[in-house]
C-alpha cells in the first residue's frame, strides 16, 4: 500500500472512531427522537460498526475478552450490534424505534428501580458508590485541558458516559483535522491524550456498565450498543497508542 493509500486508510479510521463516539454520546445522552432512530439504522452506522468488527478481527486477544456475567466476548458484542442495526433497518420503523428509546432510556439510566443502570464512572470505581469523587474531578481536568466545559458543570456528573463520549468525539475531530493538515506531532499528542483518558476513565468501568445494560435491557436496543461501546473502548485505546507511536517515529 502506497503512502497516499495508507494516509487515506488512516484518515478513514480517524473519521470512523469520531463518528462512533458521537453516536454513543447521543444515544447514551438521552437523544430519543426520530433523528436518533434514523441514525441507528443509517448506512454510516453500519459502516462504522463494520470497521470496528474488522479492527477486532486483527486483535484476537481483545476480540476474545469476555465482559461480566453475560460472558459475551467483545467480538460477539459487535456482531450483536450489527445484527440489531440490520433488524431495525429491515423493519424500517423509525417511529417505533424512537418510541422504544423514549420508553427505555428513563428506566435504564434515570429512574432508580429494578432496571436502573448507573451511567457514571464514580460509583463503579469508588468504595462508597457516590458521585463527584476524585475520579470525577480528574475527568473534569481532561475536559478543561482541552478547553471544554460542561454546560451544567458542578450540577451534572462530568464522568457520565455521554459526556465522556462527547469529549472523545470532539478530540477525535481535532485529531482528524490535525492529521488532514499533515501535523503528525499534534496528531500524536492528541492521540496520546485520548488513549490516556480511555485507560484512566473508560476502561475502568465500561465492561461493568455494558454488562449491566445487557442484563437489564429487555428489548436490547441499548444493550446492543453498550456492548459495542465496550468493544470500541478497548479497540480504540490500542489503536490510539499504536498510531501515536507510528507518527512519533515517522
Image (cartoon, rainbow, N blue to C red):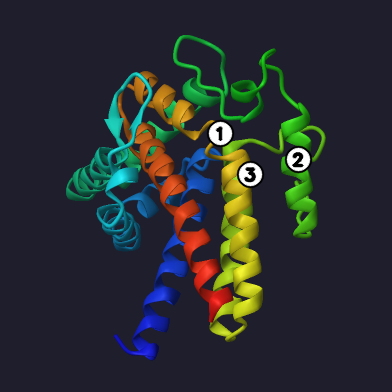
Which numbered circle lies on residue 204? 1
Q: Position of residue 149 (x, y in %)?
A: 78, 50
**Is residue 187 visible to us here?**
yes
Disc 1: CA contacts within 10 A as few (<14), some (14-19) or many (>=20)? some
Q: What element carries label 3?
A: helix
Q: How far apart are marks 3 and 1 (CA)?
A: 16 Å
Residue position for label 3: 163
Q: Where is residue 26 in the image (x, y as percent from the top left)?
A: 52, 47
Q: Position of residue 3 (x, y in %)?
A: 39, 89
Q: What element carries label 1?
A: loop
Residue position for label 2: 138
Q: How far apart are marks 2 and 3 (CA)?
A: 14 Å
Identity of the residue drawn at 58% across and 74% down: 248
Q: In this figure, what is the number of numbered marks?
A: 3
**Is residue 18 visible to us here?**
no
> Answer yes or no: do the residues labelled 2 and 3 have beta carbons within 8 Å?
no
Q: Quadrant of the N terminus?
A: bottom left
Amino acid at each position: 500500500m502506497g503512502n497516499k493509500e495508507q494516509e487515506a486508510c488512516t484518515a478513514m479510521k480517524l473519521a470512523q472512531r469520531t463518528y462512533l463516539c458521537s453516536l454513543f454520546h447521543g444515544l447514551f445522552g438521552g437523544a430519543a427522537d426520530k433523528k436518533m432512530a434514523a441514525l441507528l439504522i443509517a448506512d454510516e452506522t453500519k459502516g462504522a460498526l463494520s470497521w470496528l468488527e474488522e479492527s477486532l478481527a486483527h486483535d484476537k486477544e481483545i476480540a476474545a475478552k469476555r465482559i461480566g456475567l453475560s460472558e459475551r466476548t467483545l467480538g460477539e458484542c459487535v456482531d450483536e450490534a450489527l445484527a440489531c442495526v440490520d433488524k431495525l433497518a429491515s423493519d424500517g420503523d423509525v417511529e417505533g424505534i424512537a418510541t422504544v428509546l423514549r420508553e427505555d432510556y428513563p428506566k435504564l439510566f434515570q429512574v432508580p428501580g429494578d432496571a436502573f443502570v448507573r451511567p457514571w464512572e464514580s460509583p463503579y470505581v469508588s468504595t462508597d458508590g457516590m458521585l463527584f469523587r476524585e475520579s470525577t474531578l480528574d475527568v473534569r481536568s481532561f475536559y478543561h485541558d482541552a478547553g471544554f466545559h460542561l454546560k451544567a458543570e458542578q450540577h451534572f456528573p462530568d464522568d457520565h458516559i455521554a459526556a465522556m463520549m462527547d469529549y472523545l468525539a470532539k478530540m477525535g475531530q481535532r485529531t482528524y483535522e490535525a492529521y488532514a493538515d499533515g501535523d503528525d506531532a499534534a496528531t500524536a499528542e492528541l492521540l496520546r491524550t485520548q488513549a490516556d483518558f480511555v485507560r484512566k476513565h473508560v476502561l475502568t468501568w465500561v465492561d461493568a456498565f455494558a454488562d449491566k445494560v445487557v442484563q437489564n435491557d429487555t428489548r436490547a436496543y441499548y444493550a446492543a450498543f453498550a456492548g459495542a461501546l465496550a468493544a470500541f473502548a478497548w479497540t480504540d485505546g490500542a489503536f490510539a497508542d499504536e498510531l501515536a507511536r507510528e507518527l512519533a517515529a515517522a
